[in-house]
Image (cartoon, coloured by chain):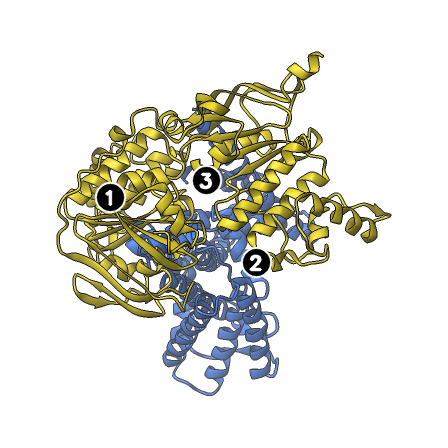
Chain colours: A blue, B yellow
């Protein structure tokens, strides 16, 4: 697993170094702040979906949950809700969404792909309907503004708020996954659900927990994105973000077959994806190529990983 | 003529290595035209591996295979078919949603420009069905046939590709008595048509009826060969276990203690209308015999809470319990070492340490945090106590041999100090040495007061280890045999539903 992190870290350093040498603007405080901010936002989503992927599932609804939370927040601000109450309600809503996904997957035995695909469509539709598909802003909610999109200045460099959220989320997630019995159970059930069940593990409850964590982090990201962008377009905000989150998780070492993943890997992978976008811009490569390049890099990363795994397995077998 | 002397199939010095285990070593085998050759051996002796190599499922690491004196390389199932070798798997590989004719010609359909020539398929299929004595319209759906008939369709399928060598892997393991007899007749007919048959079974009674010659494998090596006139039950068993039986199964029966588990009219979801009643006492080893599909595994899974009972009562130490999940069963002191070790018993991609501690983590936790110290302690002790051969605690269990994997499964449960140990085919796919250790362990645990209930398809194991045997047939417990009543005949009578004979 550590080898996995080294690989993705190497990739990050390579692209980082190459871009830094090619364009002096890259290392400017403004650019780095931006990079850090967006990487953090992607990483939070990525960590969420990583939990679901570790169980062998998938969550396609992340982007729509982000859109829904951002839209509802705007509506609540408009109808003069107490902003803190609004935040609590929306966090509760996200947890509820995850709970429903988890119950449908475990108790109804529906496929995660189908459940969350329906979620993707449903929450997007609700966002557009509730807002009449109008772009909305967040007005003057100073406390939330500084909480979700403020900066902590260190000299000329401002550490963006999402970064602090990421640190808290990452530390808690890493402890949960690596140090608690539930994290161990999650990895075990991802590797072999029946085997885990036969060892006395309540697999359904853990799976549900994974979906709850994922939707919760999607909801949290929704609030962060909302205040970062300072407006919401119900049809677009968060669209396709689930794919970035899944890409970060997979590039970061999660196997879609389940049972594998590290939090640090996902964070670095999220940073690589953002870094690639940034580099494409700064290096003057046509931005139309952006998706193609990101797609190729992920494909190469995952293929290399698979090849290394096979070589290792072969060597082990030969012993 | 010279050709007549050359065996049809001649295998020499075959080697096959799997990760962490040597499946075959220096194995020789010859097969003549029109011969029924039985290959016997205990579970894990390498029979299936050998047959899979002949059928092109596995490729050997070394050794030669000659057909009619010419060396051949069998790299795929297609190669094997081209050489006239067909394998009838233990688990049938038919598509239930297609009819008989479509199954027989699956993958080799005669066609014009992609359009299947159904007239030809049905006409030809009818001919093949006749050869195996199956009297069904060729457009019958395979799902509507019994297992026995499906097996005959498999054989017809082999005939359709002009197989000269048909390998049957445990063909009677899920057949009733009459179905088995039909199969034996088909085997005889095929032999008289000049087709050679390799027959794998651990039902020694069948082997005596059918075989022209017997080859015995033990731990992946040739253990000996018996000509027609030498074939006897004792001769085969002696070669299979490589020592005297009395030494192999050491069961010192002691006076059993109080009743640990008592089932009254317990009904499993697999056979919801059949009530099962039995009990197991402290220090008692009770075997459950029966054919594949008799409902034995289903019974264990119900006791372990995997598929909760749909009726009846279950008492543990006199108290009525209803385990609805394995977790609950474990809390009542019931544990299960399942038949399918790799799917159900272990987390293959996790280490020895992680597998060993999995059920115990809950007990050793501190506010949800894993107690890594306790974990290593449990795992270390298990490796030592069970004599598990592993390079270390961090070894991924996937790379251990079958015997050592089974010891990990048992070890993780022993750390839980169970009251009732359920074992489903405890020695399937493991070498003779580990087998003996597992028997010794069962003996030790029973002596320590654990109640043991084990399912086994190996007659010798049931006869050798059980203080008492329950025999099941189609979901019903057809009889109970005390140790002094136990014999292969008595068990088979009950296992095939012959109640009266017991």
User: Along the line of sight, which residue is nearer the eye, B440 or B379?
Assistant: B440
Q: Chain of mark 1?
A: B
The answer to which of marks 3 and 2 sits earlier in the sequence is: 3
The residue tagged 1 is: B484
Q: Position of residue B54 (x, y in %)?
A: 59, 29
Mark 2 chain: A
Q: Disc number at residue B273?
A: none
**Quick check: can you spot residue B85?**
no
Instruction: Identify the secondary structure beneath mark 3.
Output: helix
Looking at the picture, does residue A159 appear above or below residue A280?
A: below
- Mark 1: give few (<14), some (14-19) or many (20+) Cα within 10 Å: few
Q: Position of residue A222 (x, y in %)?
A: 48, 69
Q: Residue at x 65, y 58 (%)?
A: B97
The residue lying at 51 percent from left, 57 percent from top is: A245
Pointer 2 residue: A243
| Residue on which disc 3 sits | A4
Whether residue B81 is situated above or below residue B72 in the rendered picture: below
Q: CA distance from mark 3 to mark 1?
A: 60 Å
Which one is in front in this view, the residue at disc 3 or the one at disc 1?
1
Q: Are marks 3 and 1 in contact (CB under 8 Å)?
A: no
């Amino acid at each position: 697993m550590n080898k996995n992190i080294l690989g993705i870290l190497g990739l990050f350093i390579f692209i980082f170094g190459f871009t830094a040498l090619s364009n002096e603007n890259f290392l400017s405080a403004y650019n780095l702040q931006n990079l850090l901010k967006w990487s953090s936002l992607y990483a939070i989503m990525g960590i969420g979906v990583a939990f679901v992927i570790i169980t062998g599932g998938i969550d396609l609804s992340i982007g729509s949950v982000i859109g829904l939370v951002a839209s509802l927040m705007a509506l609540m601000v408009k109808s003069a809700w107490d902003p803190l109450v609004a935040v609590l309600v929306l966090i509760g809503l996200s947890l509820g969404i995850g709970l429903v996904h988890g119950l449908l997957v475990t108790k109804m035995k529906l496929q995660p792909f189908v459940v969350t695909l329906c979620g993707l469509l449903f929450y997007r539709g609700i966002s557009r309907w509730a807002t009449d598909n109008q772009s909305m802003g967040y007005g003057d909610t100073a406390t939330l503004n500084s909480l979700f999109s403020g900066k902590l200045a260190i000299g000329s460099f401002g550490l963006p708020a999402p970064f602090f959220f990421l640190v808290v989320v990452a530390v808690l997630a890493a402890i949960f996954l690596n140090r608690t019995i539930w994290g161990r159970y999650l990895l075990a059930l991802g590797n072999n659900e029946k085997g885990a069940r036969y060892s006395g593990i309540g697999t359904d409850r853990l799976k549900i927990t994974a979906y709850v964590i994922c939707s919760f982090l999607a909801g949290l990201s929704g609030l962060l994105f909302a205040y970062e962008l300072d407006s919401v377009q119900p049809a677009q905000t968060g669209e396709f973000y689930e794919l970035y989150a899944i890409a970060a998780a997979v590039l970061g070492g999660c196997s879609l077959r389940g049972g594998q993943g590290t939090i640090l890997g996902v964070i670095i992978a999220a940073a690589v994806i953002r870094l690639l976008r940034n580099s494409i811009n700064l290096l003057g490569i046509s931005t139309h190529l952006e998706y193609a390049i990101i797609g190729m890099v992920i494909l190469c990363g995952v293929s290399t990983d698979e090849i290394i795994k096979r070589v290792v397995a072969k060597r082990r077998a030969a012993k | 003529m010279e050709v007549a002397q050359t065996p049809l199939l001649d295998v020499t010095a075959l080697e096959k290595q799997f990760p962490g285990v040597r499946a075959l070593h220096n194995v020789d085998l010859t097969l003549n035209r029109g011969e029924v050759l039985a290959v016997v051996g205990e579970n894990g002796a390498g029979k299936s591996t050998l047959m899979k190599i002949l059928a092109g499922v596995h490729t050997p690491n070394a050794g030669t295979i000659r057909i009619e004196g010419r060396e051949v390389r069998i790299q795929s199932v297609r190669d094997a078919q081209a050489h006239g070798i067909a394998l009838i798997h233990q688990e049938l590989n038919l598509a239930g949603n297609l009819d008989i004719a479509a199954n027989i010609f699956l993958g080799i359909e005669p066609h014009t420009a992609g359009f299947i020539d159904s007239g030809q398929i049905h006409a030809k299929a009818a001919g093949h069905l006749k050869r195996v004595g199956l009297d069904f319209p060729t457009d019958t759906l395979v799902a509507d046939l019994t297992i026995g008939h499906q097996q005959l369709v498999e054989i017809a399928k082999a005939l359709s590709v002009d197989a000269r060598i048909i390998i049957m892997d445990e063909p009677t393991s899920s057949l009733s008595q009459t179905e088995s007899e039909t199969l034996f007749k088909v085997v005889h007919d095929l032999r008289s048509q000049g087709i050679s048959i390799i027959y794998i079974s651990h039902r020694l009674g069948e082997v005596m009826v059918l075989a022209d010659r017997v080859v015995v494998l033990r731990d992946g090596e040739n253990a000996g060969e018996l000509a027609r006139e030498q074939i006897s039950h004792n001769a085969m068993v002696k070669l299979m276990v490589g020592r005297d039986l009395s030494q192999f199964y050491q069961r010192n029966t002691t006076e059993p203690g109080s009743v640990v588990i008592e089932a009254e009219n317990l009904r499993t979801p697999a056979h919801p209308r059949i009530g099962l009643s039995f009990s197991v006492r402290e220090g008692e080893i009770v075997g459950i015999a029966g054919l594949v599909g008799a409902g034995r595994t289903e019974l264990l899974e119900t006791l372990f809470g995997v598929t909760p009972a749909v009726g009846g009562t279950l008492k543990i130490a006199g108290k009525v319990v209803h385990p609805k999940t394995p977790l609950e069963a474990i809390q009542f002191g019931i544990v299960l070492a399942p038949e399918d070790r790799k799917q159900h018993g272990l987390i293959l991609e996790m280490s020895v340490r992680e597998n060993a501690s999995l059920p115990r983590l809950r007990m050793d936790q501190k506010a949800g945090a894993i107690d890594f110290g306790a974990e290593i302690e449990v795992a270390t002790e298990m490796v030592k106590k069970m004599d598990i051969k592993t390079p270390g605690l961090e070894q991924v269990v996937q790379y251990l041999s079958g015997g050592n994997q089974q010891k990990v499964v048992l070890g993780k449960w022993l750390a839980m100090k169970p009251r009732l140990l359920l074992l489903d085919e405890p020695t399937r796919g493991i070498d003779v040495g580990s087998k003996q250790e597992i028997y010794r362990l069962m003996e030790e645990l029973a002596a320590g007061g654990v109640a043991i209930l084990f399912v086994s398809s190996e007659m010798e194991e049931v006869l050798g280890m059980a203080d008492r045997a329950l025999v099941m047939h189609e979901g019903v417990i057809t009889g109970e045999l005390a140790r002094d009543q136990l014999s292969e005949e008595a068990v088979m009578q009950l296992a095939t539903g012959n109640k009266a004979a017991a």
